[in-house]
């Protein structure tokens, strides 16, 4: 769902760069072991077929590059102001939009490396759902965030209800979807919808540092962590206890475990330099 009134104060966030007319919807670059995906789909990164496809391509590209973490950010005034309203043209005939929502969500969830979202400006409707598909969300102090779909007779279409339920509980998920309000980042941090709030001028540095910290960690173990969390959400704690041995099996053959154990014996905890394999 999109937001047409975008009232983020001008100058609050400095764009990463200004894309030209021929820029792709998502710019891609490797920063060390971090795959940086920068949305630049003017004017406000409205989610439509072009941005969906570019995000899917970006996630696949990150895997092909051997990235050990992904940073998803925006170079525009807003992170993402929701869906491209042309997606709802089919609603006039009573049909749901035909776009690969589940495919995109599955791609984010199944990617075996952490994804960090750096959120600034307006992050509403599908924009919030895109951020919720990431593993960690860092938001700027002035960000305005919410599920606003009910204001046009919808509810969140990209997994927003279930992911807020997962992060913050049923009562908060109902509140956000039913009332369709914007929230400040500090409120949503308190509710556990987002992970961290930072000063506007620190967002880029903090999100990048967090992505690099994850990329320098034990990549095989991180993949196992994502898989265990997803399994627990889908199947519950008891079933995940039963599946845990299998979900952790790759760790025991990893070079990073050998490095970590050797470093522990030689230097104590926290000094290991992992290789991501």
Image (tube, helix red, strand yellow):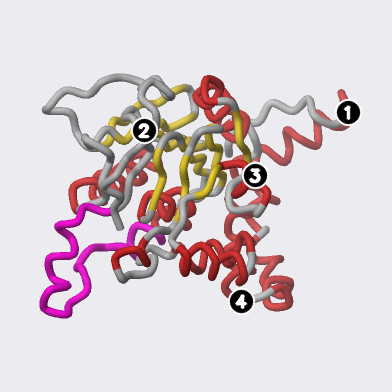
State the quadrant of the C terminus. Answer: top right
Where is residue 171? Give x, y as percent. Answer: 62, 70
> Would you name the residue on which mark 1 appears?
268
Are discs 4 and 2 less than 8 Å apart at CB? Answer: no
User: Distance of mark 2 from mark 1, alpha carbons?
Assistant: 39 Å
> Would you name the residue on which mark 4 appears?
235
User: Distance of mark 4 from mark 1, alpha carbons?
Assistant: 36 Å
Q: Earlier in the sequence, mark 4 or mark 3?
A: 4
Question: In the image, which disc is placed on residue 74?
Answer: 2
Q: Earlier in the sequence, mark 2 or mark 1?
A: 2
Q: Earlier in the sequence, mark 4 or mark 2?
A: 2
The secondary structure type at the circle numbered 4 is helix
Q: Residues within 10 Å of mark 4 (few under 14, many from 20)?
A: few
Are discs 2 and 1 less than 8 Å apart at CB? Answer: no
Q: Residues within 10 Å of mark 3 (few under 14, many from 20)?
A: some
Residue at point 36%, 33% (across, down):
74
Are discs 4 and 3 less than 8 Å apart at CB? Answer: no
> Would you name the residue on which mark 3 appears?
254
Q: Is residue 260 above or below residue 47?
A: above
Boundaries of the magenta span: 83-106
Q: Nearer the viewer, mark 4 or mark 2?
A: 2
Which of the pair 277/198 is nearer the observer? 198
Q: Nearer the viewer, mark 4 or mark 1?
A: 4
Quadrant for residue 27, please give it. Answer: top left
């Amino acid at each position: 769902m999109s937001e047409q009134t975008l009232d983020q104060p001008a100058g609050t966030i400095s764009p990463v760069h200004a894309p030209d007319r021929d820029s792709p919807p998502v710019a891609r670059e490797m920063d060390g072991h971090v795959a940086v995906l920068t949305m630049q789909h003017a004017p406000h990164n409205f989610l439509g077929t072009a941005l969906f496809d570019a995000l899917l391509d970006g996630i696949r590209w990150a895997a092909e590059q051997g990235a050990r973490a992904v940073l998803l950010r925006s170079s525009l005034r807003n992170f993402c102001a929701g869906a491209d309203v042309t997606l709802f043209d089919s609603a006039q005939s009573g049909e749901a939009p035909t776009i690969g929502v589940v495919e995109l969500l599955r791609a984010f969830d199944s990617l075996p490396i952490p994804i960090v979202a750096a959120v600034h400006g307006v992050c509403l409707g599908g924009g919030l759902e895109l951020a919720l598909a990431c593993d960690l969300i860092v938001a700027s102090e002035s960000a305005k965030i919410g599920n606003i779909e009910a204001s046009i007779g919808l509810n969140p279409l990209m997994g927003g209800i279930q992911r807020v339920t997962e992060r913050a509980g049923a009562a908060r998920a109902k509140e956000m979807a039913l009332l369709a309000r914007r929230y400040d980042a500090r409120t949503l941090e308190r509710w556990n919808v987002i992970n961290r709030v930072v000063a506007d001028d620190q967002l880029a540095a903090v999100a990048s540092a967090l992505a690099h910290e994850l990329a320098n960690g034990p990549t095989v173990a991180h993949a196992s962590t994502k898989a265990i969390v997803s399994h627990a959400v889908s199947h519950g704690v008891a079933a995940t206890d039963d599946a845990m041995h299998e979900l952790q099996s790759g760790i025991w053959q990893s070079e990073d475990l050998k490095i970590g154990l050797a470093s522990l014996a030689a230097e104590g905890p926290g000094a290991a330099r992992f290789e991501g394999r």
